[in-house]
Amino acid sequence: MLKSAFKLKCIYKSLPISNVLNFRLLSSNASDFFRTKLSELKNENISEPENSLELIFAHVLKKKLLREVRGENLKKIELTNEQIQDINEKVLTRLSHMPIQFILKEWEFRDLTLTMKLPIFIPRPETEELVELITQQVDDRKDCEILEVGIGSGAISLALLNELPNVKHITAIDRSKAACELALENAKKFNFTDRIRIFKHLLDSDTLPEIIAPSGKLFDIIVSNPPYVPTKDLLKLEPEIYLYENIKALDGGIDGLDMIKLLLALAAKYLKSEGHLWIEVDSRHPEIIKKIVENNYEQWRLNYVACYKDIFKKDRFVEVQKL
Ligand SMILES: C[S@@+](CC[C@H](N)C(=O)[O-])C[C@H]1O[C@@H](n2cnc3c(N)ncnc32)[C@H](O)[C@@H]1O
């Protein structure tokens, strides 16, 4: 929080005074105002300026669809002073590179509008596909026990609970207290609290504490979108990510595989026979994971099933099965 407030202050200082004081607008027509704000975002090289601005306008004007804040529709709207001020403040925050999800404090994931809070990892569109793969696999006639490692805002677990009524229970862990609190807040928002248990726990071995997995407890599915960015690649991330998101949610160690290796060992121990481990990974990882699984077959009895591509045609999801 401190870091973002500081950054915002700096941006305030570096902007022409007319931008900062532009809370009273020359024109209150939404279309004209949109153009003015768009050029401010473009001048500062903010990524996806149009999309950011459409989302801000839709949020402030309480419109559900982005097309309601485009073209002719926008021309018909006159803004109130409060709306102008609200848009100005949000644009100013966007100029400090704060991701739009943190500015709007909410984000859509599958069919859920999740509350977002700094600096908890923002769910990505690729991860919606991971949920899709799991929903296709789960037999909807049977109860299914799921463990999620690294729940973040709750996106994966809550979407699964929403789409799979036969999933009676999900156990989820995260090393971050703030992430656990946000996931719980989101679970409350959708009335899922009786179907999910969330624990603050740092996974650092293949063993879970008794309270999380009482002796003999096994899962049908273990799922994780772990930190998988190799440490040296963190420097290449956009400012939106490295300034505002918790780096511990991203940093996967030297080769990005630190937590993935733990997840494989965990799956060997806590998956039911024929249970599945689903992991979101870097596109360089699947081949390495396949080798690790094969090399540890005697100890783990795991089988590398497949790798699936994401919407951007990158190898992204790995499926492993317990024999
Ligand atoms: C990439 S984020 C994914 C969050 C969420 N599942 C999603 O897809 O939006 C990774 C999450 O794992 C958590 N995490 C990282 N290392 C962990 C560890 N060793 N044990 C438990 N949680 C961990 C982070 O705090 C973060 O919330």
Image: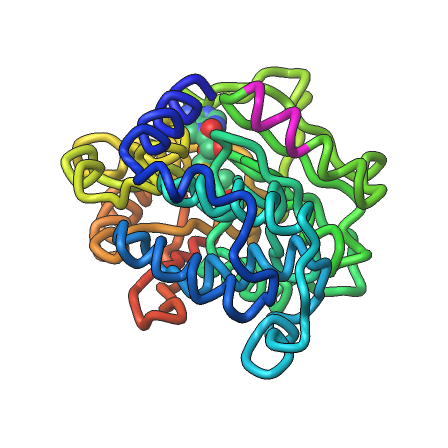
Residue in the image at 57% along x and 51% along y: 275
**The stretch drawn in magenta includes residue 179:** yes
Q: Per the image, is 77 magenta?
A: no
Residue 73 horizontal/vertical position (percent): 64, 79
292 to 198, vertically: above or below = below
Q: Position of residue 156 (x, y in %)?
A: 59, 48
Please give the name of the residue rendered at 41% of the width and 26% of the height, measured from the top-left corner.
4
| In-image side of 93 versus 187 (left or right) | left
| Residue positioned most to the bottom | 72
Left or right: where 243 falls relative to 138: left
Residue 159, image x, y percentages: 67, 53
Residue at image coords 54%, 52%: 25
Quadrant in the picture for residue 68: bottom right
Q: Is residue 215 visible?
A: no
Q: How many marks?
A: 0
Residue at 80 percent across and 64 percent down: it is 141
Residue with the most extreme front position: 26
Give whichever of 247, 3 is nearer the camera: 3
Q: Is residue 112 visible?
A: yes
Q: Relative to 303, is 147 above or below?
A: above
Q: Image check: 29 left or right of 297?
A: right
Camera-side residue of 155 and 306:
155
Of the pair 287 and 65, the residue shown nearer to us: 65
The percent coordinates of residue 254 (x first, y second) are 17, 32
Residues rendered magenta in the picture: 177-183
Judged by its main secondary structure, the magenta piece is: helix
